Amino acid sequence: MLARVWLFALVSVAAAAQVVVGVVADSSSGTPVLGATVSVQRPGGPVVGGAITDRSGGFSLRLTEGFYVLHVRSIGYDSLVRPLRVRASDTLRLGTLRLRPSSVQARDVIVEEAAPRIEVKGDTLEYNASQFKTERNADADKLVAKLPGVEIENGQVRAQGQTVQRVLVDGKPFFGQDPMATLRTIPAEIIERVQVFDQMSDQAQFTRFDDGQRIKTINLVTRPDRRNGQFGKLYAGYGENTRYTAGANVNYWGGDQRLSVMGMSNNINQQNFAIEDLLGMFGGGNPFMRMVGSAFRAMGRSMGRNRPGGDGPGFLSTFLVTPSDGITQSHAAALNYMNEFGSWLDLSGSYFLNTSSNNAEQSLDRLLFLGDSATQTQRNMQRSSAETRNLNHRLNLRADITLDSMNSLLLTPRFTWQSTDRSSTALTQTLAQSDALLNALSTQSKTTGNGFSTNSELLYRHRFLTDGRTLSARLQWNQQTNASDPSTSSLNAYYDGAPRFDTLTTAQPQDGTVRTLSANMLYTEPLAERQQLQLGYTITNTTSQLERSWTQPRNGQEFRADWHTSSSGLEHRPGIRYKLILGSPDTSAATQLMQGLMRSFAPRGMGRMMRQSDVGIWNIEFGTDLQLLNFAVDQSQSLASAAPTTFALTRQFRALLPTLSVTTRPAMTSFFRAWYSTRTNLPSPGQLQEALDNTNPLQLSIGNARLGQEYTHSLWLTYGTFDLASASSLFVSLNANLTNSRIATATTIAARDTTIALDLANGTQNLILPAGTQLSRPTNLDGYWNATAFVLYSRPVTLFDAVKLNVSGTLALTYQRDPSLVNGQENIAHSTIVTPGLSITSNISENLDFTLSGRTAWNTVLNTIRSQLNQRFATHTILARGTYITSDSSAWLDGWVFSTEFNYVATVGLAEGYNVGVPLLNLAVGKRILDGRGEVRLSVFDVLNRNNSITRNVGSGYVEDVQTTVLRRYALLSVTYFLRAFRGS
């Protein structure tokens, strides 16, 4: 029925609308004017239609019958305004509309004309900050959160459906790769434009060949009159239940020399800096094996096999900006410095110090399916508490050194050191389907550890006299080490038959290191005016070592087991790329002027890319790499006084890795990019190692020495366009991945006591699985693929000629086909997530700021077997946020600040007792003092005292719901001073 209504409406509009066509030309030369803006509005009303002229100067509009005012504008010309009457007749032909060249300087025209809210520049979306009103003292994160297609949630910034991994300021790194640290340091009022794009690697920017190593990036372009001076804020607050917060950020900017200092301390779960999780202290499993797996997988991408907007550089890109669970007290300090020393050195660096203490309590309710039917189940319930102390140091440097006009060096070292101390207790019970108690486990554990990592790169760049001929060499050194000393003490009770009790105390210290050294060389050669060739060669060597011990008291003596595992991989990768430029660029004066302006405002390193994406130009790149990899794993194991046993494995991998890239700009206001690539993913030593892991006696795992490497095809499509007349924009992206020989999981679940025969590299071994126990083993399976589509549409709306709003709608579609083996049968899990969203933000004034948004995520998981694991649940999210600041001639009535934020999250489809809605209401009232430079505020967090945290997880053979303690209601009285002292340009 709804479809019929929409169809009827569209037919009705089409029937009533008349076509209006015309041509815009230069009054002096008579040449067509491309890119002129044609807009139509009702007399005294808003714009109702518009178009951009094509290469012939032509345009076409659809208008209903009535009277209008027609505006024609183009940079370098005087504007043309004329009345227009549309009758209910055939096509209205306006003929040629002639624009007179303007006598005003181009730069004067630009200030007035070039101020749309969103522009497409190359493959960059640029937002005009002045078109998105925020309150006077807001930080940049408040501005960025109002931009269409950008959202900030749980300390993560997402743009166009992808995680933002870097925020630049005036095209330069600011606080390393920590987006939130940057956004919460820069005031919104000093920002002129915000640019969102997929930034290429430094080497790709130099060679002009797209290597696929793109990361989603935001560039904050500051106002020229705000680049000299001091700015920042100082704040402190205290409230009930000893809640407090205090901090400061101060910036000293003098043109190219910029110094920023930050510090903070609070116990209200505010963490403004990212934490690199070297030790995995917030999760389970073996952190070293995860580390090794990431390092070896990185080898498969050594020449840039990442998909656009993918994982980013290296394997140290997992950040925890907001502490995951519980209540956290944080202390942090940071320093950022940047400067240009003449024309030979561009230097920037940052240092972070973080320390935190986290207390979390958690309830877990897990339903395990023992067989292929829903009638064979067990229930596992766990209550746990943990205290974690964490200390982090992080140092980032970037030195861009110009040796001469043809040679340069880029040095980017990064270092991180981390220590942790974690203590936890847990009580676990397992119930049969009849609710009879099968066992109970009381556990106390303690872990101390420390880790160090470095990810450093040196890039040499040489440009020959011939344009397009370059030579570049890159040297990368990555090292990650960690050491931990976990110990566990548990009391076990078994109630299957006569009650039995057992105590178990174990210690499992481990020490591991992963080192990766990679070198590559790229040479580019112009073959013709529009053809270019790139030859490359990469060699990568990765080694790892792990020392692990396991001790347990038995009969008054200590039983000890030791493992030593080492692995190495040597990869050679020659590659070739070919670039072809097709089409004829638009050479009209208006187009050339606009493209010149776009390049002048582009982030550093994007100018060359834009020159290759002029209107009408098709950039096509294709090529392939040849992967030649030798991989070896050695392991020795000694149990008590028995003779050590050894295990050795050597593998060779060979693969062709083709790639294809197509980029074009169909018009001044649109872009299109397609990227196809292939990549490999090696099995980690932990996946290859055929040693039984019985850390959890009910969930065993073992490796598979016969694993092969994954081979993935990736396709990425993006399209963006905007309409100058209506200021509307559309962005569409599609990403699809198909993986052959995917490293999946084969799970064996014992419904009764079962003996299985394991086919290992050293022969067959029998393993007894008690009833309710499951064994997981990696295996290669074909047929995995996933796809994600994202659509963003945005436009401004004016209500009652005064209420200006920015309205944006999003739609995200995600599908995944994930094969696995369950008791020897192939199970295909089909996962679908459909997430529509709508956001309305105000654009009225600095004194009134509000945001209304809603989003629903429908989740569906369907399995071809074990249908009891099928899931259908939805999460609904509603957000309402507003700030009103009074303005009055009376000093007493002026400057009152009223703020509110309401966030409602409701999930349906979970287990009984977990389907609850969580309304989170925050209120604040404040008074501006010291001529607006200071503010006294009383805030109440979680006014309704309903804050909660519930998560659903679906695994192989189980479904679980997890509830974690969160911060509840408190009131806080705070004082803030805003520092603003600018000296102009």
Image (cartoon, rainbow, N blue to C red):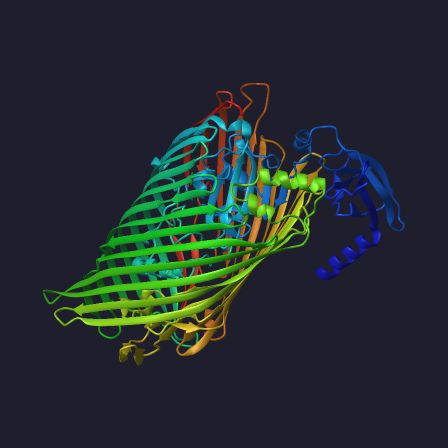
Which residue is at 47% across, 75% downward? 865
Q: Nearer the viewer, residue 630 or 935?
A: 630
Q: Is residue 911 visible?
A: no
Where is residue 737 drawn, in percent x and y?
Answer: 51, 64
Classify residue 508 by image quadrant.
bottom left
Q: Is residue 594 above or below residue 209?
A: above
Q: Is residue 72 above or below residue 569?
A: above
Quick check: 440 left or right of 343? left
Q: Is residue 840 visible?
A: yes
Where is residue 31 drawn, in percent x and y?
Answer: 79, 42
Quick check: 131 left or right of 631? right
Where is residue 779 drawn, in percent x and y?
Answer: 39, 73
Which residue is at 41% across, 64% downward? 681
Q: Is residue 778 above or below residue 470?
A: below
Q: Is residue 623 above or below residue 197?
A: below
Q: Nearer the viewer, residue 798 or 684?
A: 684
Query: How many numbered marks are there?
Result: 0
Residue furthest to the left: 556
Where is residue 270 drawn, in percent x and y?
Answer: 40, 40
Residue furthest to the top: 890
Which residue is at 36% across, 75% downward? 748
Q: Nearer the viewer, residue 464 or 347?
A: 464
Quick check: 844 left or right of 759? right
Residue furthest to the front: 465
Give the position of the N terminus as an image quadrant.
bottom right
